[in-house]
Amino acid sequence: MTEEFLWEVVFKDGATLKQFNPDGSENSFKKIQERYNEVTCFKLISNSENFEVNLLNGCFTLNNQKIYFFEPEDKINYRLIFFKRRTTVMNSTNIFTEYWLGWQTTINGKNEKRIMRISNKRVYFTEGG
């Protein structure tokens, strides 16, 4: 199944890791998990759209439009949230993928999450603890 979006990650040392290498081989998501505490930015890229979450300042970017939930200068430890959900429509061969991208943090002892759900060319934000 062809992916609508491909991921790209940026680490603290400036290194980047793309889902696919120039030779066409695929990088496992495990490579990100091995350097999880070093991730500074996670991107989902398609031919027409770009979405990203910056884990240094909590900023979401949707096609070059920035969205902040907290003041950018706040020193907050943001942790990456990323997963995909595939759904099959009953009595059909239609399968669609939702991409969930965001962060989780703890502020004053309270768990906080902000997640961008990308589904069928629409973007939704969820929040919660």
Image (spheres, rainbow, N blue to C red):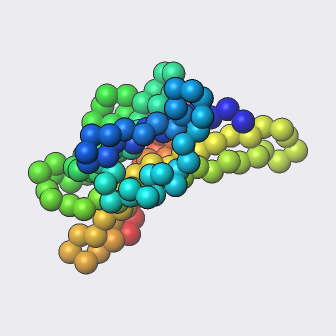
- Up the image or down, 34 lies above or below 56; here it is below
Q: Which residue appears at 42% of the width and 30% of the height? A: 50
Q: Quadrant where the N terminus lies?
A: top right
- Up the image or down, 69 lies above or below 128; here it is above
- Residue at the far top in the pictured view: 48
**Residue 118 at least partly seen:** yes
**Residue 122 at least partly seen:** no
- Residue at the far bottom in the pictured view: 109
Q: Quadrant where the C terminus lies?
A: bottom left
- Up the image or down, 71 lies above or below 48; here it is below
Q: Which residue appears at 31% of the width and 65% of the height? A: 105
Residue 49 position, x and y percent, is: 46, 27
Q: Which residue appears at 45% of the width and 57% of the height? A: 33
Q: Is residue 67 left or right of residue 9?
A: left
- Residue at the far left in the pictured view: 73
Q: Which residue appears at 52% of the width and 38% of the height? A: 19
Q: Is residue 111 left or right of residue 82?
A: left
- Residue at the far right in the pictured view: 91
Query: In front here: 59 or 56?
Result: 56
Residue 113 position, x and y percent, is: 37, 61
Number of numbered labels in the structure image? 0
